[in-house]
Image (spheres, helix red, strand yellow):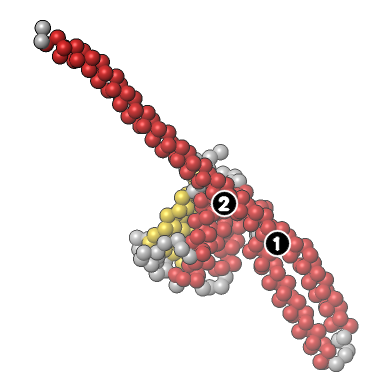
Amino acid sequence: MEATPELNFLNTLLPLAGILFVIATGVILLNQHFHKNLYRQKLEQEELKTLHQQQLLQSSIQVQEEERKRIAQDLHDELGAALSIARMHLVQLEQQSADKSDGILSALKNVRTLTESSLASMRRISHELMPPQLEAFGLIKTLKAMADQINSTNKITINILSSELPELSWPINVGLYRVSMELIHNTIKHAQATEAHIELTWDGHSITLQYSDNGKGLPENTTSTGLGLKSIEARTNSLHGTLTLGTGESGGFCAVVKIPFSR
């Protein structure tokens, strides 16, 4: 009979303990669920932030290219036409002044020479801003034409190799052209190289640009902090691609740019 109060107490305590256990378990599960939701929301926010940054980068580069194209067109159509007309008038004045003093004729020739030099510089700048052959003939022919111009200086030899490529979209054409030009510019400016190679391939899923030179290679602990490398990295990122920099097996600088592309 004395054990009856204890049994009653236990009978009362056990259901209460069970209820407390269920509550505690529920609190733990709710807390875990809350943290999972919080973590998922953070991931979604980071993805949205990355996507937004990617869109801003693409938009920025697109605006840059459109502005380059507009300026190149204006230079060619307006300034180029004006310089050509000025040169034509100077030639006519030279012919009309053939029997005049040598001083006047010499001055006219000097002005014509200056005009022709300005016209050549204008055309070079216009082509660098937006090479007309890129839209007309595609990436490979444009790169080969550019390589021929550089090779004619006899300071460095640029070799362009390519397998058969599909028809590329305009952003990829422009992006790979700008990347190639920046890589070549870095080689000429920093590498002390005599040769550089660009190879373009397509495996059905991505376009790969492999670049190498026989210069002094990439300095140790180098990161993409220079303006040139930052530009290459930005253009690669805008095309959802990857960029790998390093030193080749036989020395020299090397870079691999891989851009996803399928028909």
Query: The residue tagged with tag 2: helix, strand or loop?
Result: helix
Q: In this view, does 219 lie to the left or right of 75?
A: left
The quadrant of the picture occupied by the N terminus is top left
Q: Which mark is residue 72?
A: 1
* Front position in the image: 251 or 94: 251
Residue 100: quarter of image? bottom right
Marks 2, 1: nearer the viewer: 2
Q: Is residue 107 left or right of residue 66?
A: right
* Front position in the image: 22 or 4: 4
Which x, y percent locates residue 217?
A: 39, 66
Q: Which amino acid does label 1 sit on?
A: Ala
In the displayed structure, 9 sits above or below 223; it is: above
Extreme-top residue of the structure: 1
Q: Is residue 212 left or right of residue 99?
A: left
Residue 96: quarter of image? bottom right
The quadrant of the picture occupied by the C terminus is top right
Which residue in the structure is indicated by mark 2?
57
**In terms of sequence position, does the residue under pointer 2 or pointer 1 come before the other?**
2
In the displayed structure, 212 sits above or below 242; it is: below
Q: What residue type is labelled 2?
A: Leu
Residue at 66 percent across and 68 percent down: it is: 124
Residue at 83 percent across and 71 percent down: it is: 85
Q: Which mark is residue 23?
A: none
Which x, y percent locates residue 173?
A: 59, 51
In the displayed structure, 36 sits above or below 189; it is: above
Which x, y percent locates residue 239?
A: 54, 48
All told, the count of numbered labels is 2
Residue at 27 percent across and 23 percent down: it is: 21
Answer yes or no: is residue 140 visible: no
Which x, y percent locates residue 38?
A: 42, 37
